Amino acid sequence: MKLVLDYLKQNQGRFVTELCEYLRFASVSAQPQHKKDLLACAQWLVKHCQQIGLDARVCETDGHPIVVAKTKREKNSTKPHFMVYGHYDVQPPEPLELWTSPPFEPRIVGKNLFARGSTDNKGQNFAHLKAVEAYLKTGTPLPCDLTFVIEGEEEVGSKNLSTFLKNNRKELACDTIVVSDTGMPAPKHPALTYALRGIIAFEITLTGPARDLHSGIFGGAVENPAMALSQLLAKVRDEKGVIKIPGFYQGVAALSKYEQAQIKRYPLSDAGLKKLVGSPQLFGEQGFSPLEHRSSRPTFEINGLTSGYQGEGSKTIVPSWARAKITCRLVPNQKPAHVRKIVCAWLKKNCPPTVRMKISAGHGAEAYLVSPTSKPAQAALRALEKAFGTKPILMREGGSIPIVNEFKKVLGADTLLLGLGLPDDNAHSPNEKFNLDCFANGQRMSAFLWQELT
């Protein structure tokens, strides 16, 4: 391993330069005008993988291409086979006026590299590529076969990846999948994320009068859809933070003593969390800690409310409609179809007869859980400790990565979530950044991981 680790240390400057080149591609999958940027980014990535020494190709889909890169395999190889998943597409950079520097012109300040996609997900996934490069360029034998699958549609729901997995099931069959697209609580607190929350999304529209009405002439005689929607949503949760929809908590399991002990090792205090999010006071379901609130408890969140006049000044109307965008985060053992059914039924039952309701369904995904005591998980913890020089923690994360469930269903393999992002890296926000120490240690972690897994 000395040759590999020395190579990584000696080439950090070049790695950062290459990452900056990667980050200059405006690979925004949600915006059609960037289709050519996504293709150019995928082609750059293939060329880079080939220069490292991997067999790489661009795989066309009905949307944006998928990059597949593999170590050269011996015929009838009996080595274990692992897959590394990542994505080269990024979130839209807007609002641009909130960026300190242009989002696709990488800027280094101290130990931080600022650019859209730096932490989500180009920088994190690039760390794994550099680790493999160190093996290949030093002639150090890898104890396993590796396949990288790097897609261009993660930020828009991985629309074509499921079909790609099914069509290439034999080639991609593997023992374990590694994903670095989550986070760690602090630079000195590396983490293995062993659970993710699931999700259901939908949109509620209440319609009242056939058109906006004069609030002086008609107000008080007809229902105001904005008021009706506000009152309906207010019934969902009580003052203690408990969701009042019957059956909402069905299947939700309490954390084990082992998990509770891991929570106590989490370094971010409640005061630190309050400062991080900028709220005057934290709020959550009574009887649970803020960390449990955002990682192991289900939620009902209003993501957006729209109704009536939004322009400058006043306009005295009774709006004809009101709309809310909703997501529920789900935890292991909750079934998205069941939760969607009972939530929609409750909303329809409690909708007043003075308005008409329409519910439009959005995406959904189950929560993900892998045993933290499994052999692959324990191997990952050893690799993290060797790379970062400190004992890692186990944690649940509140976000959702729906594709990991698809990996399990199609390939039958569990996923190790080894995130390198920090809480203040501003993923999906202006001034996104990636800590360069996490980048370097992530490479070391990846280098150790292949030894530990075998």
Image: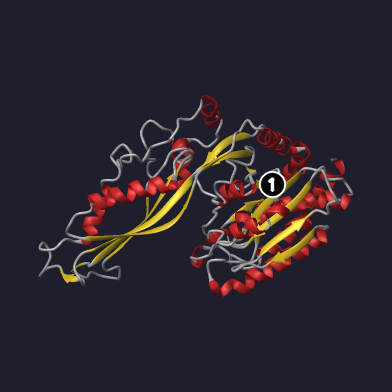
Q: Name the residue nearer the viewer: 138 or 323.
A: 323
Q: Is residue 158 visible?
A: yes
Q: Circle 1 sits on which residue?
A: 437
Residue 375 point in image, percent of width and height: 68, 33
Position above or below: 391 against 312: above
Q: In this view, does 117 lie to the left or right of 209?
A: right
- 307 displayed left or right of 338: left
Residue extending farthest top: 257
Q: Residues within 10 Å of mark 1 (few under 14, many from 20)?
A: some
Image check: 99 left or right of 9?
left
| Amino acid identity at mark 1 | Asp
Residue 4: x and y, percent?
84, 45
Instruction: Determine which quarter of the picture holds residue 373.
Output: top right
Estimate the x, y position of residue 372 in percent, counting from the top left: 61, 33
Quadrant hosting residue 369? top right
| Residue under the image location 59 percent in, 38 percent down | 370
Looking at the image, residue 300 lies above or below residue 122:
above
| Frontmost residue, 175 versus 198 | 175
Q: Is residue 442 left or right of residue 193?
A: right
Kindly identify the residue that appears in the image at 33 percent across and 38 percent down.
Answer: 242
Point out the image quarter for the C terminus. top right
Residue at left offset 52%, top offset 37% = 268
- Residue 69 pos. (x, y %): 75, 58
Q: Residue at x 27, y 62 (%)?
A: 322
